[in-house]
Amino acid sequence: MCQVELGRKQASRRLAERLEPVYGVPKGRFVGKYRFPQRGRRPLGPEAGAALRALLAAAPVPGQSRQPDKQSPVPPPHGWDDWQGTVENPLWPVAPHLGRDAADEVVQLETSRPHDDVFWSSMNGLPFDSWTEKRFMVKLGLAKGQLVRVAPARAGASARVVDGRSGADIRHRPQNAMVLSLGGLDAVIWPQRPVRGRTAWKLDGLAVVAAAGRKLTVNIEIDGPQHDPLRDLFRQEDFNLPTLRYSAATVNAPGFIKRLFTDLRTLLGAQ
């Protein structure tokens, strides 16, 4: 209850059901008032469903076909034991940080999904390091992306996704991701995923993209104030993941999602 009141945790349907007799209200009062999503798998729209099926059926490009060996959990060598994102809410207040255009995009996204409770509860629960990374997810949503829970291993991601606190391998665990198809390229993108190789890194975006029956795992990075090209090179060698890096200005500019998918398509074709 304390975590819910402080906004650190979303209230669940089960909690609402348990509180109804505590407060003496009729059964279903709390559950009905807050319109919790139905239990079970999230329903996929036709486009997102087709994109996800194509991704699952595609074969990894040569050199990315081997999944990392499963190892015992290793505590990450960074200070993420209490990391929950530097900004608690992924969408508001965007305007003071990124300007009026960013706020308008959020309004557009809200208008396009007025009653999608599952989408908004997921979006508001995603932790990020910067407002630009949040706007990146908004742009994916405006491009008709759909939030789903899918395990990186099931989608064929060639990376060992780990828990940011314990270092435990969680690549077989379903995790929030954006699925969308654009210009003949299908993509699933997990935001803010810690990945482990010889060391551990937190990727701004871990993507699996597919076209013509082939798929590739890609690291998407958004420039921070201390960008170091050598770190990108080491990360590529460590994970065997090609990296696409964009400045914050590029991500915030109009047309970024089309540019991203063009770059992803070129990268897939070059493998």
Image (cartoon, grey):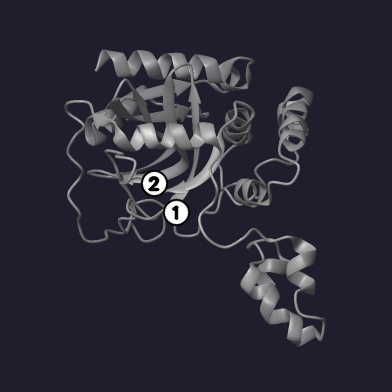
Relative horizontal placement of residue 76, taking residue 190 as reference (left or right)? left
Comparing labels 2 and 1, the label whose residue is closer to the camera: 2
Residue 110 seen anywhere in this rendered image of the structure: yes
Drawn side of residue 10 relative to residue 149, left or right: right
On the image, numbered disc 2 is attached to which residue? 194
Residue at the extreme right: 25
User: Of residues 14 and 11, which is closer to you in this image?
Assistant: 14
Q: How many other residues sit within 10 Å of disc 2, few (<14), some (14-19) or many (≥20)?
A: many
Q: How many marks?
A: 2
Seen from the viewer's position, the closer of residues 51 and 65 is 51
What amino acid does circle 1 point to?
Trp
Q: Quadrant of the N terminus?
A: bottom right
Tell me residue 192's x, y (percent).
47, 42
Residue 97 location, quadrant: top right
Q: Locate the C terminus by quadrant.
A: top left
Residue type at mark 2: give it: Pro
SS of the residue at dot 2? strand
Can you tell which mark lies on residue 80? 1
Residue 69's disc is: none
Occupied quadrant, residue 5: bottom right
Q: Callout 1: 10 Å neighbours few (<14), some, many (20+)? A: some
Q: Residue at x 36, y 61 (%)?
A: 166
Question: In terms of sequence position, does the residue under pointer 2 or pointer 1 come before the other?
Answer: 1
| Residue 1 visible here | no
The secondary structure type at the circle numbered 1 is: loop
The location of residue 226, given as percent across then percent down, is: 47, 29
| Pointer 2 with pointer 1, Cβ within 8 A | yes
Whole-angstrom CA distance, mark 2 to mark 1, is: 10 Å
Rendered residue at 53%/35% (across/down)? 46
Location of residue 195 with respect to 22 vertically, above or below: above
